[in-house]
C-alpha cells in the first residue's frame, strides 16, 4: 500500500505544469510514511514541503496542486492537507481487505521483495578463534549474523553465509602448546601450566583424545621440556616470552610432524564442537573458510602483488609496509615482517580481495566490538587494490552481560570464567536465546536476564509473541471442535466490513510488514523485526480480548478469522527470519 501511494504521488508530481514545478525538480522520490495518529489518515507524504523551496512555491499551495493531480484510485477515500503541507491519505476498507487477501495468497512469501538490481552479498559472522567453546558473546554474533543474512535474503539479496576459521595464528599455537602440556600430564609428567595458556577444562578432553591417537609417541620428560626455559609469570618472568619459548621447545622436541599432529587435532576437535553448537542453535554456513588456505593457495601473494603493482608498498627497517594512510587509515601497516613472515593484516586484505574475486558485491562482516580499528585498514586495502571501499560493511556487535536474580555473572575467557553458548541454550532454550540476543540494536550493550528469558509471562517478549501465534491456532481448533469451517476467500473480502478500532489497528499492524522488512534490511537491523513483532502481538492480543472471533454470523466470523490468520502468518514469517519457532500450542 505504501508503494502504491508513492506511485500515485510520483505520477501527480510528473503531471504538474512547469509553471507550478519546473521539470528539473521532479526527480525527487516521494517519501511516504505511516501516520502515528489515525485521525491524520493512514499515510502521509511531505514532498510538497521538500520541493517548495527549490520550486519557489508556498508548500500548502504546492500540496494542493499535487493533490489535484493525483490519479483516481478506489483504494483512497480521502486526501487532505495538514500543517505546513503534509499530504494525508485515508485508505478505504477495501484497501486493507485487498492487502489481507495478499497475505493469504502469498503466505510465507508475504513481504518478500526483489531488488531492482541483483546484489550478491557475503555475510561473514561469528568467525571465533577455534581455541575453545563458543561463549555467550559469540552467541549474539551468531544470532545477529544468521538473522541478518535471512533478512537480506527475504529482502531480495542473493546471500551466502561464511565462517572464517582462524587456523593460522598465534592463538592456535598457544592452544596446541596447552594441549601438549595437558597430554604430558596424562603421561605422568608434573610440570607447571603456562600462565598464558588456555586453562579451561575443555582442553583436557582434547589432550585425552591426542593420547588415544598417538599413545606415548609425543611424550617428553618434564625436565627435558623445562630445561633452559625463561621464567613465567608470576615467577618474575614474562608470560608472552615464556609461551613463545615453550612453543619453540615443543617443536624442537617432537618435530614439525608431531607439532602439526597436535595442532591439527586440537583444531579439529574445537572446530567440531563449534560446528555442532552452531548447528544446534539453528545457525548454518554455506562455507567454512580456512585462513591457512590463503597462504596455501597463493591468495596472500596475489594481494601483495596487486598492491606492489599499484605502487602502494615500500620497505622500511627490513619490513614491507602498505601505504594505508593514503587511503584514510591512521597509520601505515606492515604486511611482511623483517623475518619474512606475513602479518595478520596481509591475510585480512587477501581474504577480502578473494571475496571480491568470487563475485560478491557486498562484503558484510559481523565482528565483535573490539574490532573497530579493523574497518578503516581493510577498506584501505581494498581501495588500494582497485576495489570499491564501500563494498565492505562492518557491523560491530557490542558485549553481552548475563544477569541472574539481578546479579551480574562474571566472565573472562582466558581463565575459563565464562558461560558457554551451549550452557545458555540448555538453560533458556534456543528461541529465547535467538530473540533476546536481537532485542536491542547491535551497537548497544545487551543485558540478558536469564529469569525473564525463562518466564511464561507477557513481560517475556518470546512468550508474548509466540503466544499470539499459538492463540490463533487454538481458535482454529475451537472452530473445528464446533463443526464449523472457514471460507477464507469470503473472509478476506469481508475484512472490508470490519470497523471496530481493534480490528483497524490489527489490519494496520499486519500490513506494515513489507515496509518493516524493507527498512530493517536497508539499515541492517534485525532488532526492528523484534520490535515490530511485539507491536503486532500487542495489536492481536488487544483484539482477542476485545471481541469474540467465533460468532454466529458467518460473514463476521469468516472476516475476523481471516484477519487473525493473516496476523499469524506474518508472525510466523518474522519469527522464521529471526530463527525462532512459531508454535501452535504453548
Image (spheres, grey):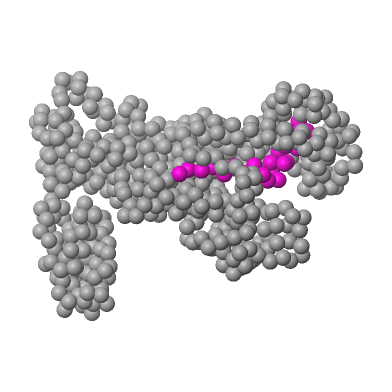
Image quarter (top left, top right, bottom left or bottom right) of the C terminus: top left
Apparent side of residue 105 relative to residue 115 in the rendered image (left or right): left
Residue placed at 81% from the left, 42% from the top?
248
Which percent across, then down, holds residue 541?
27, 37
Residue placed at 63% from the left, 63% from the top?
308
Apparent side of residue 217 relative to residue 97 in the rendered image (left or right): right
In the foreground, 301 or 562: 301
Residue placed at 16% from the left, 44% from the top?
98
Figure quadrant of residue 82: bottom left
Residue placed at 44% from the left, 49% from the top?
121
Q: How many marks?
A: 0
- Residue 335 in view (yes/no): yes
Which percent across, then down, holds residue 525?
41, 50
Figure quadrant of residue 335: bottom right
Q: Which residues are magenta?
A: 160-182
Q: Is residue 200 above or below residue 312?
A: above
- Residue 460 in view (yes/no): no
In the foreground, 267 or 141: 267
Which percent across, then down, holds residue 504?
19, 45
Apparent side of residue 391 relative to residue 246 in the rendered image (left or right): left
In the foreground, 119 or 96: 119
Which percent across, then down, holds residue 3?
24, 55
In the foreground, 336 or 208: 336
172 magenta-colored: yes
Amino acid at each position: 500500500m505504501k508503494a502504491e501511494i508513492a506511485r500515485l504521488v510520483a505520477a501527480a508530481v510528473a503531471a504538474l505544469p512547469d509553471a507550478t514545478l519546473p521539470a528539473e525538480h521532479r526527480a525527487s522520490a516521494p517519501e511516504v510514511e505511516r501516520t502515528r495518529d489515525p485521525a491524520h489518515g493512514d499515510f502521509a507524504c511531505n514532498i510538497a514541503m521538500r520541493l517548495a523551496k527549490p520550486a519557489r512555491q508556498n508548500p500548502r499551495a504546492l500540496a494542493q496542486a499535487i493533490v489535484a493531480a493525483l490519479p483516481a484510485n478506489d483504494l483512497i477515500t480521502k486526501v487532505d492537507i495538514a500543517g505546513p503541507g503534509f499530504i494525508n491519505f485515508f485508505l478505504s476498507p477495501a484497501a486493507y481487505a485487498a492487502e489481507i487477501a495478499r497475505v493469504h495468497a502469498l503466505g510465507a512469501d508475504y513481504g518478500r521483495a526483489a531488488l531492482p538490481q541483483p546484489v550478491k552479498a557475503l555475510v561473514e559472522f561469528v568467525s571465533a578463534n577455534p581455541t575453545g567453546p563458543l561463549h555467550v558473546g559469540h552467541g549474539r554474533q551468531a544470532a545477529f549474523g544468521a538473522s541478518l543474512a535471512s533478512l537480506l535474503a527475504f529482502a531480495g539479496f542473493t546471500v551466502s553465509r561464511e565462517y572464517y576459521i582462524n587456523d593460522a595464528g598465534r592463538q592456535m599455537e598457544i592452544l596446541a602448546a596447552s594441549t601438549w602440556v595437558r597430554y604430558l600430564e596424562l603421561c605422568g609428567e608434573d610440570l607447571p601450566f603456562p600462565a598464558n595458556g588456555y586453562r579451561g577444562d575443555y582442553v583436557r578432553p582434547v589432550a585425552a583424545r591426542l593420547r588415544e591417537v598417538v599413545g606415548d609417541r609425543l611424550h617428553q620428560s618434564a625436565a627435558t621440556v623445562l630445561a633452559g626455559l625463561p621464567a613465567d609469570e608470576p615467577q618474575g618472568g614474562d608470560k608472552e616470552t615464556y609461551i613463545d619459548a615453550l612453543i619453540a621447545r615443543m617443536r624442537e622436541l617432537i618435530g614439525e610432524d608431531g607439532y602439526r599432529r597436535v595442532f591439527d587435532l586440537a583444531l579439529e576437535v574445537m572446530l567440531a564442537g563449534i560446528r555442532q553448537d552452531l548447528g544446534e542453535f539453528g545457525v548454518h554456513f554455506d562455507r567454512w573458510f580456512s585462513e591457512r588456505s590463503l597462504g596455501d593457495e597463493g591468495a596472500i601473494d596475489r594481494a601483495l602483488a596487486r598492491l606492489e603493482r599499484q605502487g602502494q608498498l615500500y620497505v622500511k627497517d627490513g619490513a614491507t609496509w602498505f601505504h594505508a594512510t593514503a587511503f584514510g587509515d591512521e597509520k601505515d601497516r606492515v604486511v611482511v615482517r623483517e623475518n619474512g613472515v606475513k602479518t595478520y593484516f596481509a591475510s585480512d586484505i587477501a581474504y577480502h580481495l578473494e571475496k571480491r574475486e568470487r563475485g560478491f558485491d557486498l562484503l558484510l562482516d559481523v565482528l565483535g566490538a573490539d574490532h573497530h580499528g579493523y574497518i578503516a585498514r581493510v577498506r584501505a586495502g581494498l581501495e588500494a587494490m582497485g576495489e570499491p571501499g564501500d563494498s565492505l560493511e562492518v557491523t560491530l556487535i557490542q558485549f553481552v552481560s548475563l544477569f541472574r536474580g539481578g546479579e551480574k555473572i562474571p566472565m573472562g575467557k582466558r581463565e575459563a570464567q565464562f558461560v558457554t553458548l551451549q550452557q545458555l541454550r540448555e538453560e533458556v532454550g534456543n528461541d529465547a536465546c535467538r530473540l533476546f540476543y536481537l532485542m536491542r540494536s547491535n551497537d548497544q550493550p545487551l543485558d540478558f536476564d536469564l529469569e525473564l528469558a525463562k518466564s511464561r509471562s507477557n513481560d517475556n517478549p518470546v512468550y508474548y509473541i509466540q503466544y499470539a501465534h499459538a492463540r490463533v491456532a487454538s481458535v482454529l481448533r475451537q472452530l473445528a471442535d464446533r463443526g464449523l469451517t472457514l471460507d477464507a476467500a469470503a473472509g478476506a473480502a469481508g475484512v472490508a466490513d470490519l470497523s471496530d478500532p481493534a480490528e483497524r489497528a490489527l489490519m494496520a499492524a499486519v500490513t506494515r510488514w513489507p515496509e518493516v522488512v524493507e527498512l530493517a534490511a536497508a539499515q541492517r537491523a534485525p532488532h526492528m523485526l523484534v520490535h515490530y513483532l511485539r507491536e503486532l502481538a500487542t495489536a492481536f492480543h488487544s483484539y482477542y480480548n476485545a471481541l469474540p472471533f467465533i460468532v454466529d454470523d458467518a460473514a463476521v466470523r469468516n472476516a475476523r478469522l481471516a484477519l487473525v490468520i493473516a496476523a499469524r502468518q506474518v508472525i510466523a514469517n518474522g519469527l522464521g527470519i529471526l530463527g525462532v519457532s512459531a508454535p501452535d500450542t504453548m
